Image (spheres, rainbow, N blue to C red):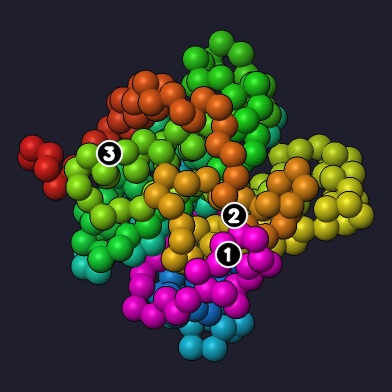
Amino acid sequence: MHDSWTTDWTTDDMPSQEGRLAVVTGANSGIGYVTARELARAGVEVVVTGRDAGRARDAAERLAGEVTGARVRPDLLDLADLASVTGFAHRMEHGGRPVDLLVNNAGVMAVPRRRTTRDGLELTVGINHLGHFALTGRLLPLLLRAPAPRVVTVGSAMARRPPADLSDLQSTRRYRPLAAYAKSKLAVVLFALELQRRADTAGARLTSVVVHPGVSMTGLQRHLARPVRALGRLALDRVVGQSAEQAALPSLYAATAGDVVPGGFYGPTGRFEARGAPGPVELPAPAGDAALAHSLWDISETLTRVRYRWPASPP
C-alpha cells in the first residue's frame, strides 16, 4: 500500500462512505460546508449544523442542489450555548441511529474584546474547545454504537505558537484575541489526543484525530480588521492561493482514509504547511504532556458539566 500523503490526495481518493452518518459542526459555510458536501458526495448521510437555523437550512438546500442524491438534513447547534448542545444530542438520540463520524469543525478567531458564552465561558475557548468537548461527550453513546466511529477535530497550526498557554484558559487575567485563539486550539489538540487515550483504556473502537487546514481566508477571519482581511486575501491569492476546497482536504482525509492513525495530527504537507496534499504533520510540543491533557479534561468536565460515560464506567 502506498503512502497516500506522498501523492496529491484528493476527494477522488475517498473510499465509498455509503451507510455512514456524519455530524459536521459549522457546516453552513467555508471549510465545514465543503467537508459536508464532499462527504455527501461519497455517500454519507450528513447532519449540517449551524448556530443559525435558517443558515443551516439554506446550506443543506444548497448542498442538495450541488450533489445529486445527497442525503442531508439541517439542525440547529449553537456551541456557545450548552443547552443547545444538549438539545441537539437529544434529537440525535431520538433518531436512534449510531453516529459514524463527528467532525468538530466550527470555530471563532480573533474576537476583538473578551466576550462570554451563554454559560459565562470565554467565547473563543467556549466554542472552539468546550462546546465541542460537550458535544462529543453527549454524542459518545451514539458514536460507540457505530462499527468504526471517528471523531475529527479541527485544530490550527497556531497551537504551536508560544502564546498557546493554558495556565489562564479563559483569559480572565489578560485577553488578547490571537492568544485566546492559539490556546483554544492547543486545547483542541490535547482534547483529541486524550480522547484517544481514554477510548483505548476503555477498549472502545473509536478513532480520534486532529487536523489543521493550513491557510485559507474563510468566515473564520471575520473578526479581523477589514484592511488585515483584505491584505490577507491578496497574499493568499498571490502566494498561497488555497481555497476552502483545498483547506477541507485534511478533514476529509482524516474522516475517510484507511491509513489514518488513531491520535494522529494531519494537515497540508506543502511548504510551511500552508497548503498541499494532506498527511501527518508535527504535533505541538505540549501535546505530549499527558498530565496537562488530563488536567484540561478535568477542567473541561467541570466547566461543561459533561462527563464521558465509557462502557466500563460505573453508572
| Type of the residue with mark 2 | Gly
Q: Are marks 3 and 1 in contact (CB under 8 Å)?
A: no
Badge 1 is on which residue?
Answer: 4
Q: CA distance from mark 3 to mark 1?
A: 28 Å
Instruction: Name the image quarter holding residue 18.
Output: bottom left
Q: In front here: 36 or 284?
A: 284
Marks 3 and 2, Cα distance to the nearest angstrom? 24 Å
Disc 3 crowd rating (10 Å Cα; few below 14, some 14-19, many 20+) is some
Front-lying residue, 85 or 271: 271
The region drawn magenta spans: 1-30
Q: Regarding mark 3 in the picture, which secondary structure is present there? A: helix
**Residue 23 falls in which quadrant of the image?**
bottom left
Circle nearer the N terminus (2, 1): 1
Residue 65 % position (x, y):
59, 84
Please tell me which residue is depicted at 66% across the width and 66% down the height of the picture.
Answer: 7
Q: Residue furthest left?
A: 315
Verify whether residue 28 appears in magenta. Answer: yes
- Residue assigned mark 3: 198
Q: Are marks 3 and 2 in contact (CB under 8 Å)?
A: no
Residue shown at the point (56%, 83%) measured from the top left:
67
Query: Residue 312: which numbered mark, if any?
Result: none
State which tag comes first along the sequence, 3 or 2. Answer: 3
Which badge, 3 or 1, is on the more N-terminal residue?
1
Tell whether 47 sits left or right of 52: left
Q: Which residue is mark 2?
A: 279
Q: Amino acid at mark 3?
A: Arg
Q: Position of residue 51 (x, y in %)?
A: 50, 53
Q: Is residue 209 above or below residue 170?
A: below
Which mark is nearer the camera, 3 or 2?
2
Secondary structure under the numbered disc 1 in the rendered image: helix
